[in-house]
Image (cartoon, rainbow, N blue to C red):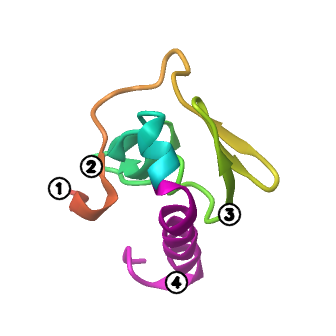
Amino acid sequence: MSRSSGPKWQAVHAAAGEFLDHYATEAAGYGWTTLQLFGVHPFLGVVRSDYCGALVLSGEKPSGVEPDRILFQRTHYRRGVPGVPTGSVPLWSFTGK
């Protein structure tokens, strides 16, 4: 499945758009980075979920942003968790090579 097709990617795209519309300024003020929000593994994409940013995992629409968490209706994404690998790339730069 390509990044731009299928219901999963459509949900991720919609959730990311909603986040940007409603929470981007607040997230920037808290220091959230592009990779913390939109990062993926440079070779495996979302297969390595431990490399993924908050907005590429579930496609669930965001419900809020805090200094260390992105909130969703049923869960949250916490940044700064020990052991999270570095080296992700923005989703739009992912080539799989």
Amino acid marked by disc 1: Lys
Q: Residue at x 25, y 59 (%)?
A: 94
Give the residue type at disc 3: Glu
- Kind of residue sitting beneath label 4: Gly
User: Mark 3 or mark 1, which has the lower sequence index?
Assistant: 3
The residue segment tinted magenta is 1-24
Say which label, 1 or 4, has the lower sequence index: 4
The mark nearer the N terminus, 3 or 4, is: 4
What residue is pinned by disc 4? 6
Q: Quadrant of the C terminus?
A: bottom left
Q: Are marks 1 and 2 in contact (CB under 8 Å)?
A: yes
Residue plotted at (55% across, 76% down): 14
Residue 48 located within the stretch drawn in magenta = no
42 relative to 12, above or below: above
Sequence order check, earlier mark of 1 and 2: 2
Q: Per the image, is 7 magenta?
A: yes
- Looking at the picture, tell me which residue is in the foreground, 3 or 81: 81
The image quadrant that residue 86 belongs to is top left
- Using the rendered image of the protein, determine whether residue 33 is visible from the camera's viewpoint: yes
Query: How many residues crowd around disc 3 within 10 Å: few (fewer than 14), some, or many (20 or more)?
Result: some
- Label 3's element? loop
Q: What residue did someone put label 2 on? A: 43
| Residue at (51% x, 68% y) in the render | 21
Decide: few, some or many residues near mark 1? Use Cα within 10 Å; few <14, some 14-19, many ≥20: few
- The residue pinned by badge 3 equals 60
Q: Report x, y in % for residue 10.
A: 53, 80
Q: Are marks 3 and 1 in contact (CB under 8 Å)?
A: no
Secondary element at image label 4: helix
* Residue pictured at 47% horizontal, 24% vertical: 84
Q: Where does the image place residue 27, in percent across and percent down from the top left?
A: 49, 45
Secondary element at image label 1? loop
